[in-house]
Image (cartoon, grey):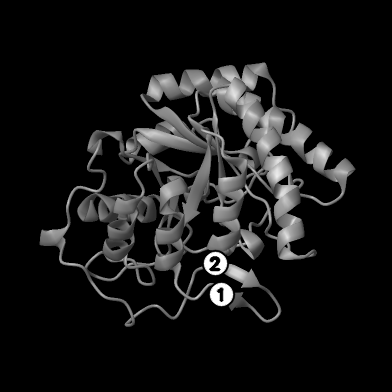
Amino acid sequence: MKRRQFIFTGLAGSIGVTSLSSFNTLSKSNPSNLKISITPWSLMRTGYGDNDPLGINVFDYPAVAKSIGFEFIDHEMFHFPPNLNKKHLATMNANMKAAGVKSGVFLTGGVGDIGDKNLTKRKKALKTYKYWVDIASELGCKSMRNVCGENITIPFDEKLNYAIEGVSELGNYAATKNISLLIENHNGYSSSPEWMISLMEAVNLKNVGVLGDFTNWTLKRNPDTFYPDPYKGIELLAPYIRAVSAKSSEFTSEGEEITIDYKRMFEVLKKAPQLEFIGVEFFGNKISRKEGAIRTKELIEKVI
């Protein structure tokens, strides 16, 4: 099970560094509200019950996360067994309680598009993700991430209209479970801040917002075309951002991420008043997964 990955390159040497001494507390209104979570992909690189020789069993995930310093964990749909049942959920909840960790964001996507032009396909996707809203609720998650608009097959405005319909329906359903629905910039139209802002403004639901991914800025493929400034992209989306995916792959000897200026990124995120979860997502291979997750967490703590 492989997941499409992208890290925005070409940034090294072209970014300014903000003085750490001048960096104010990230969330001025409620700094204690910020929570650093770990995303499953940091530790588990396969899913749907497959064995990962270098990873861990999904039900051991809470204890492993706690052992490396995390108080909150995110979940991802494809890490759970395909025959997910109430016993599995009870086991996960019991293991989280035993480890002393709580749920953050439940990550969904990839099995249907809630903004699909085809009504039958859109309804099928909505049914699928409503099921995962229920699962997110059972696990005590605050939010559920979904994606739409990543495949460009129809014009900008037309795709926006279908996405508005799908996000509105799923968002309203999520509200009945006290879940916030977060749409991620996940390539295609969703990596256009203009498109995402239009989507948020049109949906206009209190429980609908954005999960800001540091690196998913591929606007078009073949050849790849990127949104030119990921920091500006996050800044534009900041009023709607409630969680972020803090990507990392390699670090300098000083502990800095090699392609993302975390100081600059978190300076931008001071403009995100609703930000609550900072999700560590390490996907490098040159150091161990646990070490990568720890280094990312330490870097976040340093800059905030």
Report the residue marked by disc 1: 226
| Mark sitting on residue 185 | none
Instruction: Identify the residue at horizontal 22%, vertical 43% (top origin).
Output: 28
Tell me: 19 left or right of 284.
left
Which x, y percent locates residue 63? 41, 31
- Mark-to-mark CA distance, 2 and 1: 5 Å
Q: Is residue 51 above or below residue 215?
A: above
Q: Nearer the viewer, residue 44 or 123?
A: 123
User: Contact (CB < 8 A) between labels 2 and 1?
Assistant: yes
Which residue appears at 69% of the width and 21% of the height? 85
Q: Position of residue 147 (x, y in %)?
A: 64, 49
- Secondary structure under tag 2 reads loop
Q: Which residue is located at x 57 percent, y 20 percent?
A: 138
What residue is disc 2 on? 217
Q: Amino acid at mark 1?
A: Phe
Amino acid type indicated by mark 2: Trp
First in residue order: circle 2 vs circle 1: 2
Neighbour class for label 2 at 10 Å: few (<14), some, many (≥20)? many
Q: Is residue 275 left or right of residue 189?
A: left
* Residue 18: quadrant of the picture: bottom left
Q: Is residue 52 visible?
A: no
